[in-house]
Image: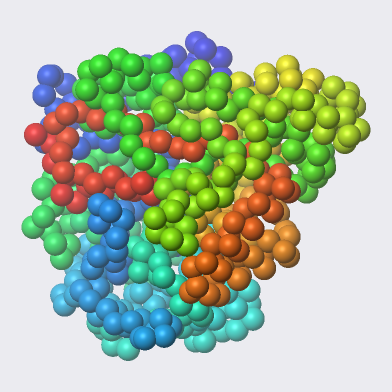
Amino acid sequence: MTVPRKKFAALAAILFLMVIVAVLPGCGGKSGPKYLRYSVGTEPETLDPRKSTGIPEATVEAQLFEGLTTLDAKNNPIPAMAEKWEIAPDGLKYKFFLRPGIKWSNGDPVTAYDFEYAWKTALSPDLGSKYAYQLFYVKNGEAYNQGLTTADKVGVKALDDRTLEVLLEKPTAYFLSLTAFHTLYPVPRRIVEANPKWAADPKTLVGNGPFKITAWVHNSRIELAKNEYYWDAGKVKMPKIDFILTESGSTEIAMFDNNQIDMGENAPPAEYPRLKKEGRLQISPYLGTYFFAFNVTKAPLDNLKVRKALSLAIDRRAIIDNVTKGEQKPAMAWVPPGMADASSADDFRAIGGDFFQDRDIETAKKLLAEAGYPDGRGLPAIELIYNTNDVHKAIAEAVQEMWRKNLGVNVSLTNQEWKVFINTRSKGGYQIARHGWIGDYADPMTFIDMFDSTSGNNDSQYKNPQYDNFVRLAKSTGNQEIRMKAMHSAEKLLLDDAVIAPVYFYTRVSMVKPNVKGYQRSVLGHVYFKEAYVE
């Protein structure tokens, strides 16, 4: 286990606080500045919206960029870069009309050609975007990504500076919501072609959102300023935002209590009662699932009965009650509640129900014995990896003890810095990995297609033609009964194959100063600060 010693961790936290105090003007005293200081969590892997995958990246990018649409407070798509659109009666052709005079943060015009370039390069096999599959709905998008056709055959085309035509493979009811997702943001073609590393340097990172980047001190902070070229700049109230980068919950709560940040998402659960009493804790819906991914290609996790035994031996309720403490719900399924089934009055999760019993120790022991490892004897070494974070560490340690006590299985734990962890997990260089998934849009497909064999986010290396067929069937029809039946079948197969061990359905637990107003929080994990202000 590569956890730092306590003295080193404490010293690091003190030094971090000293640095933050030194570099953030106006942080002292009883009243903070009239701009927002928000702890976004870990250092972003990238700020190129075509390549990013995580919530920290998406949160920063949501301030720097804007798609054809954006989502309102109820997650409905509304006009953004596009002022209007037309949809063909068959649902296969969309025509978007961009607002006149829209500009990048450097003053260059934003055109339909930038959107065409962004989407096609996101699909390019050379870029290697893990989210390329979000554009497979576009005609020939998947074929191009798989090297079976050329970019000119992809169904996105700028007809002129302000008109973008999009052809789809199949009618997709949530396509307008997808156009608000970061993979479908535009990128400035002139800048990107001149410098492939454009998104790594604040001097060349050009966006089209309500804010622009002015500084990026790695592993410390990202500074944004109001983008005066933004088409709706009149509604942007704050002159700047400081995103604080720290993976330490203890550092974050210390900064919050010392008036050095205004919002944060990483408070230690032990602090929740106090923060709630002070009126500074918010628990809100979050469309996501916390789980452990099994690498189904690595022994002994290539054994179905071993995977099932490990999943069944977890006490999910105990983790929620003793570790996370944020009103989460135990997950005995993959897709979280909060999304409609075939009838909008029905919830997909309620219709699908649970797939197993929480803490089913008797069955878990039986399965492990049937796999040839009674009471864990003879089981090859297993390592569980997680990204550096106090809560992830506590959950991993709790599960480690459950497996030891309930099954006689000894598992080693390894923590990794975020970028290293993401790389390790995506390349399949692990046995068991902490994972979490937040919906990209409000439809069960955002969870189901993650484990399609072509998905760039299928870190379990799961390949099942039957599963892929269920996904394709659900994507090929507009009939909601057929769609939902196919997705329920896919979810059942995923859990029958024990590709993952679901732990709990997320809530979003945030600490927020009462004087922070006007921001919009989405169940999809995004926080929009366009109209936010600090009193």
Relative to 159, does residue 456 appear above or below in the rendering?
above
Q: Is residue 8 left or right of residue 85?
A: right
Question: Is residue 55 among what the camera can see?
Answer: no
Query: Relative to 67, does residue 345 appear above or below in the rendering?
Result: above
**Residue 23: horizontal and vertical position, in percent?**
25, 30
Report the quarter where the C terminus lies: top left
Q: Residue 175 location, x and y as percent?
A: 40, 70
Residue 62 lies, with reference to residue 102, above or below; the image says: above
Residue 240 visible from this viewpoint: yes
In the image: residue 450, left or right of residue 512: right
Q: Nearer the viewer, residue 132 or 161?
A: 132
Please tell me which residue is depicted at 53% across the width and 75% down the height of the picture: 477
> In the displayed image of the protein, which residue is found farthest to the bottom?
159
- Tell me residue 309's x, y (percent): 76, 33
User: Looking at the image, which residue is at 25% across and 16% down?
Assistant: 277
Identify the residue at horizontal 58%, vertical 28% (top origin): 316
Q: Quadrant of residue 148?
A: bottom right
Residue 327 x %, y %: 41, 28
- In which quadrant of the rendered image does the N terminus lie? top right
**Lateral position of residue 455 relative to residue 195, left or right:** right
Specify the quadrant of the image occupied by residue 32: top left
